[in-house]
Image (cartoon, rainbow, N blue to C red):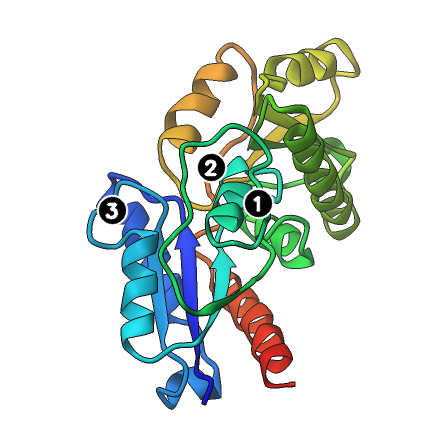
Amino acid sequence: MSKAGVLVISHGSRSPEWVRLIDEAVADVRLPEIEAGVVPVVSSFLEIVEGRLIQDGIDELEALGVTDLVVVPLFVSNGSTHVDEIRYALGDLPEPSFDTDMVPFRRNADVHVCSPLDDDPIVADIVMDHLSGITERPEKERVLVIGHGSELPDFYARWKTGMGHVAQRLQELGGYREVRTALLLPDETRDAMQAWREGTQDCDIIVAPLFLSSGYFTNTVIPDRLNGFDYKYNGKALLPHPSVSRWMEWIVAEALARIVT
């Protein structure tokens, strides 16, 4: 008899608040199979959160008799190198995409790895919702969406492609004068801001961080990188927002349906 379980994997942080937001989002996932206790759900972390790392999560689910692991990479972008590392260590990729210290996890269950958030329409919806408190005249506002990024060419391209789709949907939803994207790695933020500064001066600039949860990058790195520029910024990341849990419900339901069939 097969038994499915859900393993949610996020990066991890030394901030208890960061971990709490992840746990609350996972706990808010509502599916009949989960609420009935038929499909157990475990939230795990790539690093830092001792006792709750990925191997701990696999062991916990397999101890419950799980034979099929539905893996949810709770990461912002398909361009995150961590997503590929995790897929390789779970046996979902035959070899690593780059040099990594990660080694294959110990497991018996079959794995079914879902996609990260990336350019799912819900991402732009959340960003739009968070911007509602600071936007005033969309037709006279430019929005700069800032993500983490990567210096590895293939992963950089994935970041830019996914964020480009988010920006396009944000433009359609909000009716902004312009929406652009910039990465912290490599640093594109100041060039993007400078280009707007040298252009027309009749628009306000709004900065929207594309990060899973607020922390060092949203609170410190982005403001430091943009020092000297005028812009509106509330620092709100994707969490907390109920739509993250709804997204997990949709992709887990799809994965469970494929396992059953």
Circle 1: residue type: Leu
Q: Quadrant of residue 55?
A: bottom left
Is residue 143 at all visible to an observer of this figure? Answer: no
Placement of 227 over or under 92, stated as above or below? above
Query: Where in the figure is residue 167, as x and y percent of width and height?
Result: 72, 41
The N terminus appears in which quarter of the rendering? Answer: bottom left
Query: Where in the figure is residue 161, as x and y percent of width and height?
Result: 74, 38
Left/right placement of residue 189 relative to residue 175 reads: left
Which SS class for mark 3? loop
Left/right placement of residue 153 relative to residue 31 reads: right
Q: Nearer the viewer, mark 1 or mark 3?
A: 3
**Label 2, label 1: how far apart the Cα atoms are:** 8 Å
Query: Where in the figure is residue 69, as x and y percent of width and height?
Result: 46, 69
Q: Which residue is mark 1?
A: 131
Circle 2: residue type: Asn
Mark earlier in primary sequence (2, 3): 3
Q: Residue at x 58, y 16 (%)?
A: 187
Mark earlier in primary sequence (2, 1): 1
Asked if the residue at tag 1 contacts the one at tag 2, i.e. Cβ–Cβ closer than 8 Å, the answer is yes
Which SS class for mark 1? helix
The C terminus appears in which quarter of the rendering? Answer: bottom right
Query: Where in the figure is residue 32, as x and y percent of width and height?
Result: 47, 88
Q: Which residue is mark 2?
A: 234
Q: Which mark is residue 49?
A: 3
Placement of 134 over or under 246, stated as above or below? above
Q: Residue at x 27, y 58 (%)?
A: 56
* 209, 38: nearer the viewer: 38
Asked if the residue at tag 3 contacts the one at tag 1, i.e. Cβ–Cβ closer than 8 Å, the answer is no
